[in-house]
Image (cartoon, rainbow, N blue to C red):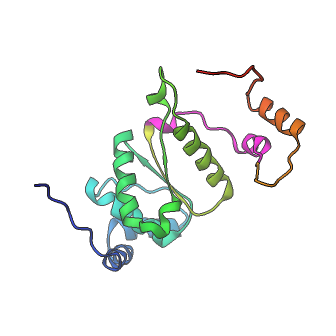
Amino acid sequence: MTATLARPPRPALDALLDRLAGERTPLSAALAAFERGIRAVALHETIPAARPALLAALYRARRRPTLAILPTPDAAERAYADLLCYLGEAHAGDLFLHRGREAAFGSIESPAERSARITLLAALDSDAPLLVLTSVAALRSYVMPRPLLRELRSELRVGGEPGWEATIRNLHRLGYERTDIVGA
């Protein structure tokens, strides 16, 4: 027999997150710091289990691009899973996990990881409200500068006519090479 934990109903969770932003908590101190123009705060004085709830309440109160740096990749993964619960479906599209490439060294990086990284870069370029979780180690990885991303970015849409030669030139600029058909 396995035990499952019941999730609080969404309205109760929303009320808790809203209340956290208004009481005298580390979160209210963080919000006051942001109001004074301070751009970075630390939630290290709270217990680790409370940090995802505080971060969710902080994000909901501010609704601005937010970067949360966690000590390890494992802590970032756990916080991401917790925040999916705390933020709910309404803000799930705002939440991103930036994984470092150190795990991929010596192995082939999965297409899903590469796609997630490009999706994050595009979201960062849009200036939309988002919450990015990362680890100290992942911050050390190279990230394409915004001007270069904008220069190399192109979109292919169903029904669009980008032009064959323009598409080939753009793919070549991105590092792709023309080869014969490759099969397994």
Q: Position of residue 137 (x, y in %)?
A: 45, 35
Q: Quadrant of the N terminus?
A: bottom left
Q: Is 94 in front, or is 183?
A: 183
Instruction: State the residue at coordinates (61%, 38%).
Output: 143
Residue ID at (81%, 36%)? 170
**Residue 72 in sight in this render:** no
Q: Quadrant of residue 82?
A: bottom left
Judging depth in this view, the residue of 65 and 11 nearest the camera is 11
User: Is any part of residue 124 visible from this angle?
Assistant: yes
Toward the left, the furthest residue is: 1
In this view, the residue in front, 38 or 122, is 122
| Residue at 44 percent of width and 29 percent of height | 103
Taking the image as shown, residue 138 lies to the left or right of residue 119, namely left
Q: Is residue 149 left or right of residue 52?
A: right
Task: Name the residue: 55% across, 60% down.
Answer: 130
Quadrant housing the C terminus: top right
Residue stretch in magenta: 137-155
Across and down, in percent, residue 158 comes to: 76, 53
Q: Magenta stretch: residue 56 in it?
A: no
Q: Is residue 90 above or below residue 127?
A: below
